[in-house]
Image: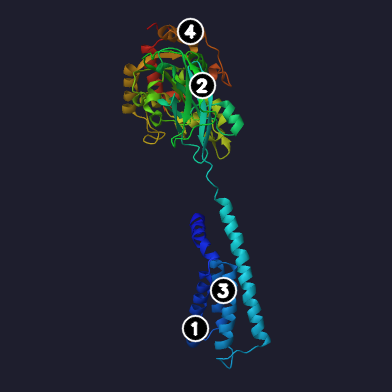
Amino acid sequence: MHESGLNSILDRLAPLRRRNVRFLFALFLVIAALALAATAQFVFRPGAALVFAVAVIVSTGLFGLAAGLTSALLSFLAIDFFFVPPGFAFVTTAAVLWLAFDLGVLAIGTHLLVRYISGRIRSKVKPPLGIHGQLDGIQNGEVYGWAMDCDNPLNPVTVTILADERPIAQVAAVHYRPDVESALHCSGRYGFYADVSQWVTAEEESSIEARLPNGRALENSPQTLTIPARPRKPGAAVLFMHIPKTAGIAFREAIAANYRESQIAYLYATPPGYLVDDLRRLPLEQRRDLRFVAGHFQYGVHHALPQDALYFTIVREPAARLLSHYAFLQHTAPELVKSGGRLLSLEELLQRKPNIHFDNPLVRHFGSVDEREFPPGSIDRPLYEKALYYLRNGFLFVGHQEYSADAFQWLRQRFGWQARAELELVNVGLRRMNDADRASTRKAMEIQNQWDCLLYEEILKLFPYNFAG
């Protein structure tokens, strides 16, 4: 029986342990045992005491020690009167008294065992911890705080923001907050940001409150805060499809500096990624406010957004990118590049295709190829054609990691970004590629990852190194 099921039965029987009816149950069990013992004595002629012992165990286990001792006493009397020769008379002998003692010990032992088992079960059933969080304040027109469902930490909490008791925004708490991670020893992806400046016509003080779905206010709520007036500016969302090992973090950090927290979404499996990887799990209003989305996603994220969206990405010469990614995985996820405890060569990985990292990843990104539908080894011409179509029709810009500074300047001029004048390269590859490595890897890729090589050639035609728009 499942632990929670047994625990439920014990909870339902608990009131009977404190009522006089428990003695009637003990009497009923003894009568049932008497009938069973008489039948067994007549048909099989076994020892009757064993049957009464079962009655004592059941009575104690279900209804407590008092009922168990009552059952033991009644069982002793029934055995003495009906089953000890000469029969239908009480006979006080040492053997009969020892039987009474044994039944009493059995009741006490059963009671202690049940208490031990019940205690172990109840200790594993933790009481609900509930939803916790707080309203931290306002900065640059954004109300911010955190909220976490401690019983369901993978489910985002929806927070409603009220100004002077009027609801003005609703957001899901999914942002990464390193301070929350440190304080609560959790993933930290429980922060929320709501731009409330667009809801006022002039700078004013308001009573700001953050409420949970059940209507309960977060800690430090309400607060009297000054809200600056800033009209909503409609615009398209910039979607940065971050392909691993292409200087993507440098681009992400430089671009994000131009946006407010409520306008940014990070779709990564680890921080600073959102708690959710599907934007459709966010309130529609929160999605509408997004202006910059970055992450290890494939083409197709725009389907979750009500506003227009513009894609861009950064690519790298396939052989160089793959060798860099191979070195990176050796340090971060060695199980992906090993077999039988042995490190596989890059050529072996390209041939075996144990995972999608080594099976035309460029086509998979541009073509929105779901690995559940198309596992490693299944990339073919129709999927390549699909990726090529999205490249030609869905991307505003494709830059090159080898010319990162030029790519960033093009983007900066196109979108009017001013926060940073140039890139700061971070997370530099663990290994530099020599000519021999490059030639060997390129040869293996031309055979095993031919579709990526073909797509990269098309990228160079559409977006050459000196692309000027």
- Give yes or no for contact between labels 4 and 2 (Cβ–Cβ under 8 Å): no
Is 417 situated above or below 343? above
Marked residue nearer the N-terminal end (4 or 2)? 2
Q: CA distance from mark 3 to mark 4?
A: 83 Å
Callout in the foreground (4, 2): 2
Dots 1, 3 in contact, CB < 8 A: no
Reading the image, the residue beneath label 2 is 224
Residue neighbourhood size for the residue with mark 1, other residues' Cα within 10 Å, grouped as few (<14), some (14–19), many (≥20): some
Q: Residue 21 location, x and y as percent?
A: 50, 70
Classed neighbour count for the residue bearing mark 2: other residues with Cα under 10 Å, few (<14), some (14–19), many (≥20): some
The alpha-carbon separation of the residues under discs 4 and 2 comes to 32 Å
Between discs 1 and 3, the one toward the N terminus: 1
* Near-viewer residue (72 or 187): 72
Element under disc 2: strand
Task: Look at label 1 and name its amino acid.
Answer: Ala
Q: Are marks 2 and 3 in contact (CB under 8 Å)?
A: no
Q: Amino acid at mark 2?
A: Thr
Separation (CA) of disc 1 from disc 4: 94 Å
The residue labelled by disc 1 is 40
* Residue labelled with disc 3: 56
Q: Hey, what amino acid is under mark 3?
A: Val
The picture places residue 230, in percent across and down from the top left corner, at 42, 13
CA neighbours of label 4 inside 10 A, class few (<14), some (14 to 19), many (20+):
few
